[in-house]
Image (cartoon, grey):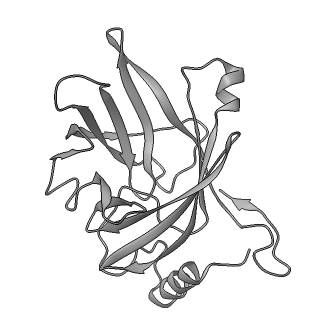
Amino acid sequence: MKLAPLAAALLALASASGCDRVLLPERRVVYAAWEEGLTLGFEDPSLDPGQRLQKRQQVRVKRAEPAAGGLAVTKTFTSMSGQWETQVLQKDGGVLLQTEHGGGILLLPEGFPDRVERWESRGSFNWVVGRATVSLPGVRTEDPGGPVGVWVESAGLDGAGTRTRTLYLPNIGEAQTMTWAQGRWVTTNLLVSRGFTDVPGKAAGSTPGSKP
């Protein structure tokens, strides 16, 4: 598999230092995907099997490069209904979704989750509920005992709207989202696969593939 430029640089750094796992230099742990080629699959367990498969979504990190004191990450979203791209700026633990007209939408604040535990965004009030060790059936992670994630709850500023709880994992981001409905929490989005994939035809002789 041909490594992307950023991944190749990180691999060279790992070989030189003898490390098994490398994060970007002087970069704090971020609760979002950033490794080029990382491919995540999501399903809605609340749907029946047929709809669940039809609405399945795949998210792949297409590109990650330094920008504005942080990391600009481009992701490709693929589902049965089509494909589209988004770009986020990751900086100091924060994640900002870039918009066409400049500015952005705050997904996670800088300093998350240790220095900033409460924030407002998109008409919602968000706060850190707590941490939890996670085991996702069928999903292999780098942490043998299961990664430690952070639960964040969101509710409308006016008390109306949907109330949700989202679990964020290091270097992955959203892994599970639950919605409060009829007096109980219902999982409406769940990480069901994690791997690394090449882009078909990206380079001569490259072969699409994946690794756990």
Q: Quadrant of residue 179?
A: top left
Q: Position of residue 35 (x, y in %)?
A: 51, 67
Which quarter of the image is occupied by the N terminus? bottom right
Q: Position of residue 129 (x, y in %)?
A: 21, 36
Q: Position of residue 2 (x, y in %)?
A: 71, 78
Residue at 64% from the left image edge and 36% from the top image edge: 56
Is any part of residue 146 visible from this angle? no
Of 103 and 77, the residue lying toward us:
103
Of 40 and 84, the residue lying toward us:
84
Which quarter of the image is occupied by the C terminus? bottom right
Q: Quadrant of residue 132?
A: top left
Q: Position of residue 133 (x, y in %)?
A: 36, 41
Residue at 54% from the left image edge and 60% from the top image edge: 75
Residue at 69% from the left image edge and 30% from the top image edge: 53
| Residue most extreme to the right | 205
Of 125 and 191, the residue lying toward us:
125
| Residue most extreme to the front | 101
